[in-house]
């Protein structure tokens, strides 16, 4: 697989505190693309194309939507993170809204997609028909409470889809198959310095074998297959890796317990075993997806 490497922005300071906008940009410019192999594998298996009407829950800055739209799918994305959603609009539609592109638009994907704020799905797909595919590409399973908001979101979305629609959930693979797990353990150790319970929302924890199945059961979904996908995390240097990893939110509890500079320093140290001679960082990972039916 071709390495996924992202160059540092000129003049970026990896030790500077990140506001919401900076964090969202780090996600969109550095980290989001690490999951591209997961998107492609799911779309291949689901045969995503012109007949697909997809609802993307937690669509983030829109890369997964762009890939689906390029295959001809009609896509609606919802997300409560307004900074990421704004980047999705800027990235995909710099000069037009999702819903008002004219029929003669030279960019057909604009007539097949839309973005909605505040995490509230629309009752029909972008082409006026019910959804037949619901995706959740924000991986769950390695942070306490990371699925709590997902279950009600799924329960709200399922009635908007056709009977027997496909729902795809995604999560981290086993820790022993994810090199990044060793770095994420820094988050747990630093968060523990403040002494809050280990069940604090957002605190890192080892991925459990049945995390996805548990979400499916609570949302009333029937599992119908699964798969694993190699998603190596590749960065141009340690600074890019630190920024990308902190943009995931998995280190938030550690930042609250200590401070951002301390977290950045210790994450950088934990990355040293994965730094290659040319300065790039390479961490093999496996992600898992669960296919369900409504």
Image: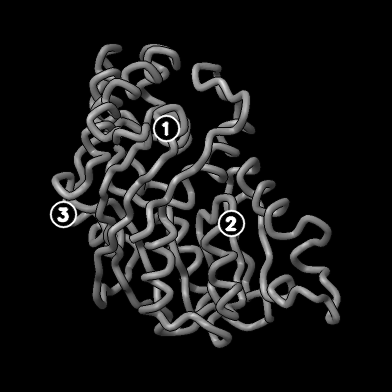
Left or right of 261 in this view: 121: right
Q: Say which element carries label 3.
A: loop
Q: Position of residue 176 (x, y in %)?
A: 13, 46
Query: Which tag is nearer the camera, tag 3 or tag 1?
Result: 1
Separation (CA) of disc 3 from disc 1 = 32 Å
Separation (CA) of disc 3 from disc 2 = 28 Å
The label number, if any, that marks residue 117 in the structure image: none
**Residue drawn at the location 41% of the way across and 35% of the way down:** 245
Quarter the C terminus occupies: bottom left
Of the residues under marks 3 and 2, which one precedes in the sequence?
A: 2
Location of residue 168 by image quarter: bottom left
Q: Classify 38 as above or below 268.
A: below
Left or right of 36 in this view: 86: right
Q: Say which element carries label 1.
A: loop
Query: Which tag is nearer the camera, tag 2 or tag 1?
Result: 1
The label number, if any, that marks residue 62 in the structure image: 2
Mark 3 lies on residue: 209
Query: Which tag is nearer the camera, tag 3 or tag 2?
Result: 2
Q: Position of residue 113 (x, y in %)?
A: 67, 70
Separation (CA) of disc 2 from disc 1 = 25 Å
**Residue drawn at the location 55% of the way across and 17% of the way down:** 16
Of the residues under marks 2 and 1, which one precedes in the sequence?
A: 2
Mark 1 lies on residue: 237
**Label 2–label 1 contact, CB within 8 A:** no
**Residue drawn at the location 37% of the way across and 16% of the way down:** 265
**Label 3–label 1 contact, CB within 8 A:** no
């Amino acid at each position: 697989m071709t390495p996924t490497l992202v160059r540092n922005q000129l003049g970026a300071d990896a030790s500077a505190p990140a506001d919401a906008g900076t964090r969202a940009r780090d996600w969109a410019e550095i980290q989001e693309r690490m999951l591209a192999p997961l998107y492609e594998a799911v779309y291949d298996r689901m045969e995503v194309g012109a007949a697909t009407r997809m609802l993307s829950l937690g669509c983030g800055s829109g890369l997964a939507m762009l890939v689906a739209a390029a295959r001809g799918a009609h896509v609606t994305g919802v997300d409560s993170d307004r900074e990421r959603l704004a980047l999705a609009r800027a990235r995909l539609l710099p000069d037009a809204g999702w819903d008002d592109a004219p029929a003669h638009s030279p960019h057909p994907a604009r007539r097949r997609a839309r973005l909605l704020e505040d995490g509230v799905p629309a009752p029909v797909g972008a082409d006026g028909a019910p959804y037949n595919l619901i995706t959740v590409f924000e991986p769950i399973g390695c942070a306490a409470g990371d699925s709590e908001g997902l279950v009600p979101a799924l329960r709200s979305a399922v009635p908007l889809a056709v009977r027997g629609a496909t729902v795809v959930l995604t999560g981290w693979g086993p820790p022993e198959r994810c090199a990044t797990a060793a770095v994420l353990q820094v988050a747990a150790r630093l968060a523990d310095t403040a002494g809050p319970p280990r069940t604090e929302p957002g605190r890192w924890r080892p991925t459990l074998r049945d995390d996805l199945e548990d979400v499916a059961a609570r949302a009333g979904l029937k599992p119908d297959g699964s798969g694993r996908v190699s998603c190596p995390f590749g960065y141009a240097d340690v600074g890019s890796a630190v920024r990308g990893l902190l943009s995931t939110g998995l280190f938030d509890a550690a930042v609250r317990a200590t401070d951002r500079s301390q977290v950045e320093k210790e994450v950088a140290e934990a990355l040293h075993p994965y730094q290659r001679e040319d300065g790039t960082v390479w961490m093999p990972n496996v992600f898992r997806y669960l296919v369900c039916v409504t």
